[in-house]
Image (spheres, rainbow, N blue to C red):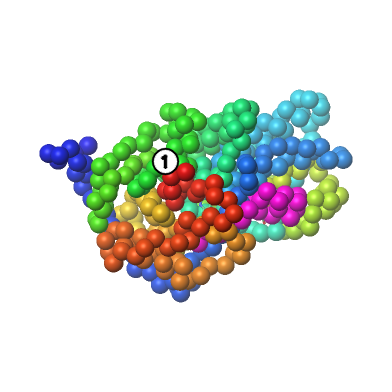
Amino acid sequence: MLLDERGVSTLPDLPTPDFAFDPHQPGACVAGLRPYRKNSYRLDKEVLGDKFVIHNYGHGGGGITLSWGCAAKVRDMILKRQAETGIIEREIAVIGAGVMGMTAATLLLDLGLNVTIYSDRKPVETTSYKAGGQWAASILEYSKDFAKVQEFQYILRTAYTMFKASIGKGFGVSEVDNYSVNTTSGIDVVHDLVPGLLPPREYLQRLPFEGHNTSGYRYRTLLVEPPIFIPRLERDLRARGVTFVSRRFINSTDVLTSLTQKVVINCTGLGAKDLWNDNQMISYRGQLAMLRPQVNLEYLYGQNGYLFPRHDHVVIGGTVEESDDEVFDPETCRGLVEYMAGVFGQTPAVPMPEYHVHHPRNERLVDPRLSIAP
Ligand SMILES: Cc1cc2nc3c(=O)[nH]c(=O)nc-3n(C[C@H](O)[C@H](O)[C@H](O)COP(=O)(O)OP(=O)(O)OC[C@H]3O[C@@H](n4cnc5c(N)ncnc54)[C@H](O)[C@@H]3O)c2cc1C
């Protein structure tokens, strides 16, 4: 690292984004509902009548990140069931066409099983498609039960390893630096739980950006671009013979009585709140502003909000609002962009909008990509 005579980092400044933005253009603003769950995500099994049901939902702001790892746990539960009963149920129903349903379906196909995906939304209409895409474990909490911690370690290791192995293979995955003013707990939790999995975090005495005189951190993680990753999962599944059935289930009885398959994988995200009567689910809306794509930007950035340059857009996010209303407000998106442009010295600095840190009812909620120390 380059240091001046005072020992201050003199890394050359990285390119400044072009913050030109019209919130009223089609596609300029996006709102999605993060499926948070109090205490922890749900990844467990139950036997209900003649059905073996595996639940895989409630991954908050980290579902893309954890997907392959949770899918591997689903596969392991099926293998254990096969070993225990001596029966191989070949027909599997997956409910949900988001990242959790489609990654689970992929690994179940690898076992030679026949998978049908039921969903009331197409993959490109799901929350998964709307995500920013940083590989960071942003969940509300994870269980501190020893077995669950081990499970979480397995999920993190498996997910990261699988995503990393898919770099350069058309899944929209790349390895990137993330510069952030504060520590990023969604990545630090990975450093704590699986030391050595990610390259170490570096302290920088000055972040290398126009308008910055502050210290910060450089992390190395992955970017998973949902507009590439989600359609790729769907294409691969269809090519391998998976049928997608458009279907809305009203409640668990509907699932249990109407499906012919005896094995059901419940990957319904926020939908599990009503479908499985899970009142630990909480919906946190995230609004994102979509700037034009800028290929010269090869970093992620975080300061009370984030900036993720992707192939489709430079994404500026993300609000954290307790709401189950999936609509965006153009003025909120404009505020996100103005705030970020001010941080880069491009417009007069504006105060951090209040909704960035608005955590009603649950003070413990931390969205690590917002760089708020726990
Ligand atoms: C603004 C925003 C930014 C985010 N950024 C990131 C990020 O940078 N990194 C990251 O890892 N994660 C991020 N996330 C979180 C991530 O998007 C979610 O955790 C993830 O998409 C959850 O996946 P899922 O498959 O469980 O749910 P979903 O994608 O919501 O899929 C649920 C599926 O279940 C179906 N379904 C639900 N109920 C029913 C029913 N009753 N009958 C039939 N079908 C049903 C739906 O149609 C859908 O197909 C972000 C989320 C948002 C909103």
Toward the bottom, the furthest residue is 24
In the image, what residue occupies the spot 44% across and 51% down?
370
In the displayed structure image, the side of residue 73 where residue 11 appears, left or right: left
Q: Nearer the viewer, residue 320 or 45?
A: 320
Q: Position of residue 63 (x, y in %)?
A: 57, 46
In the image, what residue occupies the spot 77% across and 41% down?
53
Q: Which residue is mark 1?
A: 221
> In the image, is residue 314 above or below residue 242?
below
Query: Tag 1: Cα neighbours inside 10 Å, few (<14), some, or many (≥20)?
Result: many
Disc 1 CB within 8 Å of nearest ligand 1 atom: no
Element type at marker 1? strand
Tag 1: amino acid:
Thr
Q: Say whether residue 313 is visible.
A: no
Q: Position of residue 351 (x, y in %)?
A: 36, 63
Is residue 273 a member of the stretch shown in magenta? Answer: yes
In the image, what residue occupies the spot 75% across and 45% down?
93
Q: Position of residue 231 (x, y in %)?
A: 56, 53
Q: Please tell me how many numbered marks the rendered image carries.
A: 1
Q: Say whether residue 53 is visible.
A: yes
Toward the left, the furthest residue is 5
Is residue 106 a member of the stretch shown in magenta? Answer: no
On the rendered image, what quadrant is the N terminus found in? Answer: top left
In the image, what residue occupies the spot 48% across and 53% down?
132
Q: Position of residue 44 (x, y in %)?
A: 70, 37
Start-end of magenta stretch: 269-287
Q: Nearer the viewer, residue 137 or 235?
A: 137
Q: Nearer the viewer, residue 151 or 233?
A: 151
